[in-house]
Amino acid sequence: MNVPEPVLDLARSARRVAVLTGAGMSAESGVPTFRDAQTGLWENFDATALATPAAWADDPATVWAWYQWRVALVRRVQPNAGHRALTDWARAAHVQIVTQNVDDLHERAGSHEVTHLHGSLFAPRCSRCERAVDLPDPPEDPVARLDPPSCPACGGDGRPGVVWFGEMLPQDPWETATESLREADLLLVVGTSGVVYPAAGLPSLARSHGVPVVQIDPRETDLSDQVDHAWRTTAAVGLPALVDALRIGTDTPR
Ligand code: OAD
C-alpha cells in the first residue's frame, strides 16, 4: 500500500498526533459499524432506535439485552492492525486518541491516551443515582430480553454507560478532545461517517486552529470536504502502511 506523499510528510513532521476514530476503526475486527445492517438476532432492530432514552424507558430489558450482545461480541474479537499501528506510533510521537466507539479495542491494543466521547460498553451505571454498577457476564447465547442489573446502592436499574441520542456528552472527555485537537500538529479522522454531532464538528474545529486533517475511510463521507487529504483506504490497511513508512524502530524511545 503506497502512502500518499502529502500524508506521509504530515505524519513525519507531527510530534503531537490527534486521532478521531469511529466505528470504521473496529470494522476489520468484526464489529459492525452503526450504519451497517444489524446482524443476527438484531437484524430487525435499528441501532439508532435502540440507543435512545425513549427505548430504555419503554423496555429496559430489550435495550440491556442488545448492549450485552455487543459486550459479548467485543469480548470475542481482537484489536486489528490499525489499532496496533496507533500503539506503535505512540512510541515515536504523542498520540491522543479521541474515539466515538464504546468498545475497548484501542485499550486492548495498548493505547493509553484514549478518550471516549460516547462512553463505554464496559462501564454501566445506575440509571437513578449514577453510581457505577458491576458489568455482569453476558449470556452465552444472545437473548432478546435481559433484566438489567440492580444498583447495589439504591436498587435502581443499571444502564449501559454510553451516550444515547439526545443525551449530553460527558464534559471531561469533550474538553480533553477539544484541547488535544487544538494542540495537535496533525488530526487523523479514521472510520467515521461524520453524521453525529458534536463529534462530527471536531475536524472543522481542528482546521480552524490551523491543524491539517487527514481522513482514512474507504468511502466518501460528510466530512470528506472538510479535510485536507481524504485517503481512500481502511483502518487496518492504511494505518499500518503509514506507521511502517515512518520507520519507527522497535527500540525507538518515546
Ligand atoms: P458509522 O457507522 O456512522 O460510520 C462508519 C464509517 O466507517 C463510515 O464512514 C464507513 O465508510 C467507515 N468504514 C467502514 N469500514 C471501514 C474500515 N475498515 N476502515 C475505515 N473506515 C471504515 O459510525 P460512526 O461514524 O462511528 O453514536 O457513528 C458515529 C456515532 O453514531 C456513533 O458513535 C454512535 C452512532 O449513533 C452514539 O452511540 C451516540
Image: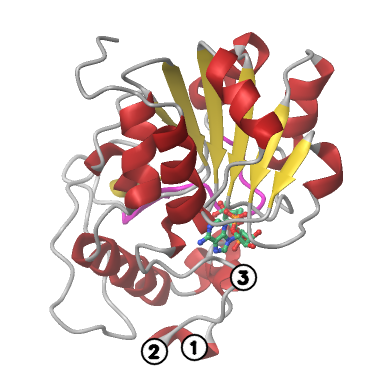
Quick check: is the Cβ at mark 3 less than 8 Å away from ligand 1? Answer: yes
Q: Residue at x 33, y 54 (%)?
A: 80
Give the crowd class for mark 1: few <14, some 14-19, many >=20 residues within 10 Å: few
Q: CA distance from mark 2 to mark 3?
A: 15 Å
Marks 3 & 1, CB-CB < 8 Å contact: no
Q: Main secondary structure of the magenta part?
A: loop
Residue type at tag 3: Arg
Q: Is residue 217 left or right of residue 16?
A: right
Left or right of 68, for residue 3: right
Q: Nearer the viewer, mark 3 or mark 1?
A: 3
Q: Residue furthest right?
A: 225
Read off the residue under disc 1: 43
Q: In this image, 31 relative to 251: left or right?
A: right
**Placement of 243 over or under 128, stated as above or below:** above
List x then y, in percent, for residue 4: 66, 40
Spatial distance from mark 2 to mark 1, Cα to Cα?
A: 5 Å
Relative to the observer, which residue lies in front, 241 or 46?
241
Residue 164 percent coordinates (x, y): 56, 53
Which secondary structure, mark 3? loop
Q: Secondary structure at mark 1?
A: helix
Q: Residues within 10 Å of mark 2 (few under 14, many from 20)?
A: few
* Residue 219 sits inside the magenta stretch: no
| Residue identifier under label 2 | 40
Q: Residues within 10 Å of mark 3 (few under 14, many from 20)?
A: few
> Residue at (52%, 73%) from the top-left corner?
58
Q: State which tag comes first along the sequence, 2 or 3.
A: 3
> Where is mark 3, residue-wise?
35
Q: Secondary structure at mark 2?
A: helix
